[in-house]
Amino acid sequence: MIRFDTLDLDQMTAAVLAGAELPRPVAGAILDCPDERLPDLLAATLRVREAAFGRQVKICILRNAQSGICPEDCHYCSQSRVSKADIPVYKLQSIAELVEGAREAAETGAQRYCMVCSMRGPAARDIDHLGEACERIRSELPELELCLSLGLMDRAQAETLKEAGAGWINHNLNTSRRFYPRICTTHTWDDRVATIENVRAAGLSTCSGGIIGMGETDDDLIDLAYATRRLGIDSVPINFLHPIKGTPLESAQRLTPERCLKAACLFRLLNPKSEVRAAGGRELNLGARQPALFNAVNSIFVNGYLTTPGLGYAATREMIERAGFEVVEARS
Ligand code: SF4
């Protein structure tokens, strides 16, 4: 174990910028950074973030395209079969509703629109339906980045969605391979990796990150961060667990803002050229410390997270600009 105080941060960022993989003991030292040294870690991480993304922040909007009654048992999820959370339940939305959601996202100022479905994986009719929605959105809003999150997917399904105009598929690894059976028993971490590989083989960009705060150890979090690097993930969302009443993780220990920020730095330093994104739970877990996230992340979700509310576009934009960063302007 290396102590954070012994790290040469200039040397560390230079090595990362030169393409070197952060040694694992250094990753451990980052998570172990004393809180009073966090400003130094954030400043070092900012140099890496700026090298690839300047001071720009991309805005993303999610749409819960099918809600609830999922057959899977992901313990963090309000839509799982083991959740007793009081949430809206509905089948896959109509194409008109999904297109309207895309219009609203673009008008709001989002660069990326992600349609998310509570399901183990899509059936053929779901792929047909969502493919048609993608084609309609693509023809009407050609500049809006289109992402889908549909659970486990094979290569042919991913290819169909790519042909229909999707650019990204989200499928989060969520945590380490070792810890995965503690948060889900209905599919495996390896199943998730297979989906990511199918998505990449289809020529789509990959979006996959995790959730911190589910009871994982530092080693689990480090394993996850290395997995995102080694799989060459293009876009890495970091969720900060928002324990939802009625889910098995409703009593999970709350994260501190410092823990969230150290984790964000770790993901950025291991993924210097990938999008790193602040996702669910940022409001609850970071509160007034959210602006510090922009030292690490270059992308953020607004207007809520499927079944939990979140900060809106205007307030998030104001926060970004006050922190000295700039929103990537929507092009459509
Ligand atoms: S597969 Fe997705 S929607 Fe279903 S329980 Fe897991 S996280 Fe929730």
Image: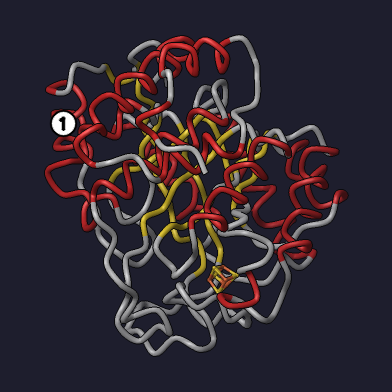
Left or right of 181 on screen, residue 329? left
The amino acid beneath tag 1 is: Met
**What residue is rendered at 63% in x and 53% in y?**
171
Q: Position of residue 266 (x, y in %)?
A: 47, 37
**What residue is rendered at 72% in x and 74% in y?**
187
Left or right of 241 on screen, residue 171? right
Q: Pointer 1: what residue?
A: 319
Q: Position of residue 160 (x, y in %)?
A: 80, 45
Say which of 189 and 223 sits in front: 223
For ligand 1, which image quadrant applies? bottom right
Say which of 159 and 234 sits in front: 234
Local crowd at mark 1 within 10 Å, few (<14), some, or many (≥20)?
Answer: some
Image position of 73 with respect to 67: above or below: below
Image position of 178 with respect to 258: above or below: below
**What residue is rendered at 75% in x and 65% in y?**
125
Say which of 324 and 65 sits in front: 324
Q: Position of residue 40 (x, y in %)?
A: 28, 24
